[in-house]
Image (cartoon, rainbow, N blue to C red):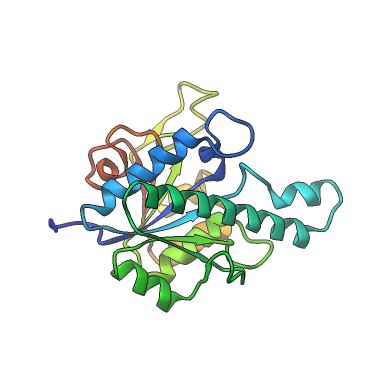
Amino acid sequence: MKDQKYRRILLKVSGEALAGDQSFGIDAKILTAVAKQIIDLAKTGVQIGIVIGGGNIFRGMAVAANGGDRVTGDHMGMLSTVINALALGQAIEQNGAKAKVFSSLYMPAVANRFTQRDAIDALENGYIVLCAGGTGNPFFTTDTAAALKAVELKCDALLKGTKVDGVYSDDPIKNPNAEFFAHISYDEVIKNDLRIMDTAAFALARDNQMPILVYALDVEGGLTAVIDGKAKCTRVG
């Protein structure tokens, strides 16, 4: 294994990104492309944990917005992350790597129950580890789950794959003159209200000095280029 800046990373993939241009569900081509990026990086010796959102299938807050029970809605959203994790885990295995799905929700017929000990053991034995079910508690987003798992699994960095290639002063799709930040401090993110992640997730990353790399899922060179510093992305912290 070559000398590496990052030995172990936690990758956060948004559910919406897996949908591609669809408004709902999983785009098989995007799923395979993401799986291949992950495998290419794993081949360099980097240990990879993954947390996936579920917004391409269901959002718990949508239930609350329509007058329903937020706790029930959030549990439904957690189940959608399990679907995405199973799909990505299967895509990883179909392309020749080992994957193991853990869930913070107890569902032994579907996934392994998440514990720090078992997940780290899987990482050290060559598995790509997928963590589903969010934090296992309502009122917390998968961004918070990603920050929590990054700290819990003793990762060197948290990578957030999105549809945008980094952090900007404004939405670059709506404002072509938005300023791009190659590097930004935690304090600047707070001061400028740049919503990289929700407040609880960002506070957890900041308090534990967990670097965050924000990049585009379709970046040329994939995850390996991001880790090697050869691809456009933003480093927070």
**Residue 57 horizontal side relative to residue 184, left or right:** right
Res 223 seen here: yes
In the rendered image, the vertical position of residue 107 relative to residue 41, given as above or below: below
Residue under the image location 31 percent in, 50 percent down: 96
- Residue 86 or residue 178, whichever sits in front: 86
Of all residues shown, which one is farthest toward the bottom? 117
Tell me which residue sits at (34%, 39%) in the image. 233
> On the rendered image, what quadrant is the N terminus found in?
bottom left
Residue 142's spot in the image, x, y percent? 56, 56
Residue 127: quadrant of the picture: bottom left
- Residue 105 vs residue 75: left or right? left
The residue shown at (51%, 43%) is 194
- Where residue 113 appears, as percent x and y from the top left, is 53, 73
Nearer-the-camera pick, 137 or 120: 120
Query: Looking at the rendering, in which quadrant would you find the C terminus?
Result: bottom left
Residue sitting farthest toward the left: 2
